Image (cartoon, rainbow, N blue to C red):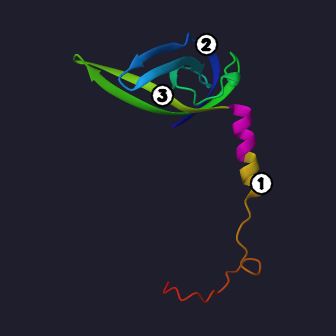
Amino acid sequence: MQLTAKLSAILPEQTGAGKNGQWKKQDIIVETDGQYPKKVCISLWGDKFDRNILRVGNRLTISFDIESREFNGKWYTDVKGWKVESANQSASLQAQQAESYTPPSYGHEGGSAIVDDDCPF
């Protein structure tokens, strides 16, 4: 899933040690657009993101997964970000990809070419 939102808070980084070694987690709070904006806490694990773009007020495009787990009869839901980009950088990349697309040529306007490639359909 993907979300573009404004960064409204950066919570203190958390670190620890588990059975798989050292870990660190950075929680951020983003605010969505729209008539009824929502605040969402997103956890960023490890060093898989550029900390320089984490500035309050920046618009970010975040790719994330949602996962729920049960513990002692209660359910807990995490929003885990796995890719964070500046929204400006993301929009620029999409525009570049759109500009670099070249539609297939069929030899003449409005028609389709007949190709002999031994394909039965």
C-alpha distance separating marks 2 and 1: 35 Å
Identified at 58% across, 31% down, the residue is 48
Q: Which residues are magenta?
A: 86-94
* In the image, farthest residue toward the left: 73
In the rendered structure, find residue 80 and report the number of the disc placed on it: 3
Q: Amino acid at mark 2?
A: Ala
Vertical placement of residue 92 versus 35, above or below: below
Neighbours of disc 2 within 10 Å: few (<14), some (14-19), many (20+): some
Q: Secondary structure at mark 3?
A: strand
Q: Amino acid at mark 3?
A: Lys
Tell me which corner region of the image, top left, top right, bottom left or bottom right, holds residue 99: bottom right
Which mark lies nearer to you, 3 or 1?
3
In the rendered structure, find residue 22 and report the number of the disc placed on it: none
Left or right, 75 with reference to 65: left
Q: Amino acid at mark 1?
A: Glu
Residue pointed to by mark 2? 9
Question: Overall secondary structure of the magenta stretch?
Answer: helix
Identified at 68% across, 26% down, the residue is 59
Q: Nearer the viewer, residue 20 or 75?
A: 20
Q: Nearer the viewer, residue 35 or 48?
A: 48
Vertical placement of residue 63 versus 77, above or below: below
Residue pointed to by mark 1? 99
C-alpha distance separating marks 3 and 1: 32 Å
Measured as percent of width and height from the top left, residue 40 is found at 52, 20
Identified at 77% across, 77% down, the residue is 109
Q: Secondary structure at mark 2?
A: strand
Measured as percent of width and height from the top left, residue 101 is found at 73, 59
Measured as percent of width and height from the top left, residue 107 is found at 75, 81
